[in-house]
Amino acid sequence: WLKKKQREGQPIRQDGPDLHLFRKLVDRSKDFVSIIDLQSGLYLYVNRSTCRVSGYPLDEWRRMRVSDIDPSARETWSPERECRRRKRDPCFRREGWLRKKNGETIPVEIVSSIGRLDGRSYLFASARDISERRRAEELLRESEEKYRTLVESTGDGIFVTGALGGSRHGRHDGPRLA
């Protein structure tokens, strides 16, 4: 949409219906959406979900960089590095953290890309809370460990079959079964 308007020579109004439509749609997202100035690394815009969950109002976000809210982002901001990352993968994906104003952190998956408008470059990022996914992964690891310990600690033969029969998993250290 944006590129089409640019190709057609239509101006992108900073205060008109284009920006109003963008904000209305993005503010409805449950994902954390942000626009970062690529040169300075400063947040220019974050949606309502980002403000609500983080506890930071928009005016505070505009004075922060990624490293201020993501403890895993230890490197100094570098526009060149961000461009190199997106040459390999235009929609760069990584996991990180969102540090809330109260100090609590939540795990997030971040997808970001670079866009250019009126000679300036911006990083557009969308992040999603992955706390539930992390909890499910931990429960699965614990369950697998219990199963592995049970199977490895018994001296009996254990076979698991599928609904139609046939061995799917097995362990046999004891005498041969007839």
Image (cartoon, rainbow, N blue to C red):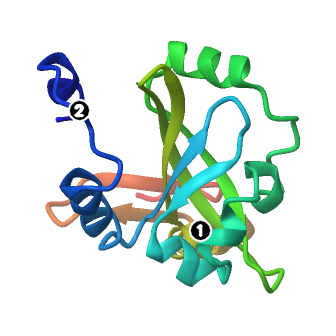
| Foreground pick, 148 / 114 | 114
Number of dots carrying numbers: 2
Relative to 174, is 125 above or below? above
| Circle 1 crowding by C-alpha within 10 Å: few under 14, some 14–19, many from 20 | few
Relative to 169, is 39 above or below? above
At label 2, the amino acid type is: Pro
Left or right of 127 on screen, residue 154: right
x and y, in percent, of residue 38 in the image? 63, 32
Reading the image, the residue beneath label 1 is 134
SS of the residue under disc 2: loop
| Foreground pick, 106 / 16 | 16
x and y, in percent, of residue 165 in the image? 20, 60
Residue 101 in view (yes/no): yes
At label 1, the amino acid type is: Arg
Relative to 9, is 130 above or below? below
x and y, in percent, of residue 130 in the image? 53, 67
| Circle 2 crowding by C-alpha within 10 Å: few under 14, some 14–19, many from 20 | few
Residue name at image x 50 percent, y 47 percent: 125
Left or right of 5 on screen, residue 136: right
SS of the residue under disc 1: helix
Residue name at image x 26 percent, y 38 percent: 12
Relative to 61, is 9 above or below? above
Q: Nearer the viewer, mark 2 or mark 1?
A: 2
Reading the image, the residue beneath label 2 is 11
Distance between the Cα atoms at labels 2 and 1?
44 Å
x and y, in percent, of residue 146 in the image? 66, 75
| Foreground pick, 10 / 47 | 10
Q: Disc 2 vs disc 1: Cβ atoms closer than 8 Å?
A: no
Residue name at image x 35 percent, y 70 percent: 27
The image quarter in which residue 116 lies: top left
